[in-house]
Amino acid sequence: MNISIWPGSASFTTLSASYYAVPSTGSRPTSFGYYDADPVFKVEADKVADWCASRMGYPIMDVELQERNFFKSFEESVTEFSTQVNMYNAKDYMLTLVGAPSSSNLSQRTVSTNMGRMIELAKSYGTEAGSGGTVDYKMGSVVLTSTTQSYDLNALWANVSESGKRIEIKRIFHDPKPAISRYFDPYVGTGAGTEQMLDSFGWGSYSPAVSFMVMPINADLLRMQAIELNDEIRKSGFTFELRNNKLKIFPIPTDTLTLWFEYIVVDDRNNPINSVTGSISDLSNVPYSRIQFANIKDIGVQWIYKYTLATSKEVLGLVRGKYSSVPIPGAETTLNGTDLIAQGREDKTALLLELTTLLQSLTRQGQLEQETIIGTSLQQQLSKVPLHIYIK
């Protein structure tokens, strides 16, 4: 079977039209057809094939490849470049993107960073502190009866109002009345002494005469402290004990009253799924799509050309490596398949390292580090500038 090799020219448009018109005529120009409709890719494909063949010795030497090999290497190179760029963008903005809709194409779009995800991470702490969060705080109550000190909140509330779900009590509203509520009219003086004082000042005939005299604030504080100290020493302290939602009230109630409390449903807090369907969850569904070759500029295009050449070298090495030597009339020639494979893979590794290093320096962290270095260097330079001496 005589298999044709590189004839010296290529036509991506002709091969593509032949495949799509009569598919049985052969394989498509590229493996996946990602860029077959890209007008710039079509034009550049022929040029890249000719350039790669020339770099591998044509026309001095035969190149045992077909135009399809060059086209497919070209497609692989564009895809590799697009994947590397998208991967670094996704990594750089992942904290911002998680939870966002996964329906929009983010390729070559500016992503505005925000504090949204940081706030979401902090909300779990807010839930426990009672200052926000993603878990609803609910109100419940239990009726305290005379002479009954212990109450099972699971039986009295959770089993009834939450269908047996576990609840966690966050706050018990069992406190004595504040001292200020037992201090009659704290803003003004009170009692017979005050009325006599008002009369002596000539304000007794005014209504309300008491508006002319305000007690100093330290008098209010002293009286409230006296009331609180009296309650602490002479009365039973209002407190409670809560263990496994078993509530014990101190002092023992002497009358029937309603005790209120705040609680959360434990399953609500432990549920890790709080995002809607169709949102970004991890690297697998970040909506970065393949970048079309027409949208890639010179820096990326040059990298793609070099990667195409390295891939083509590797493929040619595999072809030539089938036979280490070929007999010719009166002698024998050695093929360089092994060298081409090694060189192609080495070039690909070097190009990937170059690209990843560049992309790493362009991440937000990399740019901030560069700005820090520039700022430090600038500060050092400015520190050597003589300062003016001002004399009055």
Image (cartoon, helix red, strand yellow):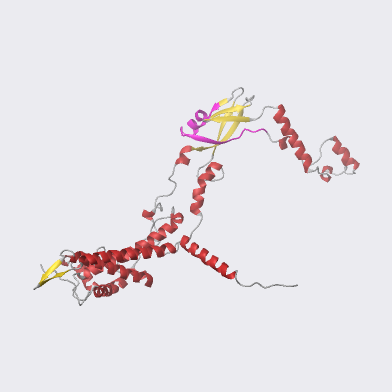
- Please name whichever residue, 341 or 19, is drawn nearer the observer in this view of the structure: 341
Residue 157 falls within the magenta-colored stretch:
yes
Q: Quadrant of residue 151?
A: top right
**Which quadrant, please, contains the C terminus?**
bottom right
Residue 349 in sight: yes
Q: Position of residue 18 (x, y in %)?
A: 19, 70
**Which quadrant, please, contains the N terminus?**
bottom left
Magenta part of the chain? 151-176
- Which residue is at 88% across, 40% downward? 197
- Please name whichever residue, 391 or 170, is drawn nearer the observer in this view of the structure: 391
- Which residue is at 19% across, 65% downward? 319
Q: Is residue 205 left or right of residue 22?
A: right
Residue at the extreme top of the image, as rendered:
147
Q: Is residue 86 left or right of residue 151?
A: left
Residue 295 falls within the magenta-colored stretch:
no
- Which residue is at 60% across, 70% downward? 384
Residue at the extreme front of the image, as rendered:
331
Q: In the rendered image of this protein, does residue 238 appear above or below residue 333?
A: above
Q: Is residue 334 left or right of residue 179?
A: left
Q: In the rendered image of this protein, does residue 150 appear above or below residue 302?
A: above
Q: Position of residue 300 (x, y in %)?
A: 36, 69
